[in-house]
Image (spheres, rainbow, N blue to C red):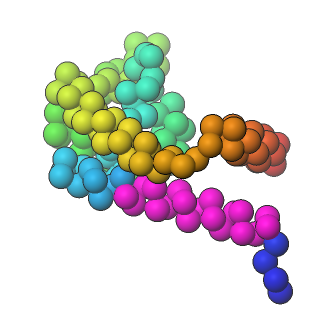
Amino acid sequence: MPLTDQHRFGMQLAQMSRGWRAELDRRLAGLGLSQARWLVLLHLARFTEAPTQRELAQSVGVEGPTLARLLDSLEGQGLVQRQAVLEDRRAKRILLCDTARPLIEQIETIATALRHELFVGVDEEDLRVCMRVHGHILANLEKS
């Protein structure tokens, strides 16, 4: 059965996502962080207020128990801290420690350099069209 453009698009998108993450992971290896750990730190840094563990898990796209193990590790490294939520004793807010800030800056610098390299030769209008297409697909996924 011949592949349609829709098949190719999905395969190419998955390949690009895996490749991008793998290359970023390779470049961040010197920081001593696994892909899962740096991803949690980046998501955490993008919240304006300290999220609950559940909110962070949703943002990262992992199950609660998986995030709990990652947070145990990050907490052991002195990069994050859990804080009880007064209104709900079962919930914990996740705070970045000051020691995490320079590390996050390094991650962001490396990620930005890679992004610039990957977008060499990509026209701004092509990028806008691509983002519009991805937006439609994401909206359709949310309807599913």
Q: Residue 89 at x, y = what percent?
A: 41, 22
Identify the residue at image location x=62%, y=59%: 13
Most foreground residue, 78 or 65 = 78
Taking 23 as reference, is 53 above or below it? above
Residue 39 visible in the snapshot? no
Identify the residue at image location x=32%, y=23%: 95
Span shown in magenta: 5-23
Left or right: where 59 falls relative to 22? right
Taking 17 as reference, is 105 above or below it? above
Quadrant in the picture for the N terminus? bottom right
Most foreground residue, 72 or 25 = 25
Q: In the image, is residue 11 part of the stretch drawn in magenta?
A: yes
Taking 35 as reference, is 82 above or below it? above
Most foreground residue, 144 or 2 = 2
Identify the residue at image location x=23%, y=55%: 29
Identify the residue at image location x=49%, y=61%: 18
Most foreground residue, 10 or 79 = 10
Left or right: where 74 falls relative to 58? left
Q: Residue 113 at x, y = what percent?
A: 35, 42
Left or right: where 112 falls relative to 73? right
Left or right: where 46 falls relative to 99? right
Q: Main secondary structure of the magenta part?
A: helix
Q: Residue 2 at x, y = what percent?
A: 82, 83
Quarter where residue 104 is shown: top left
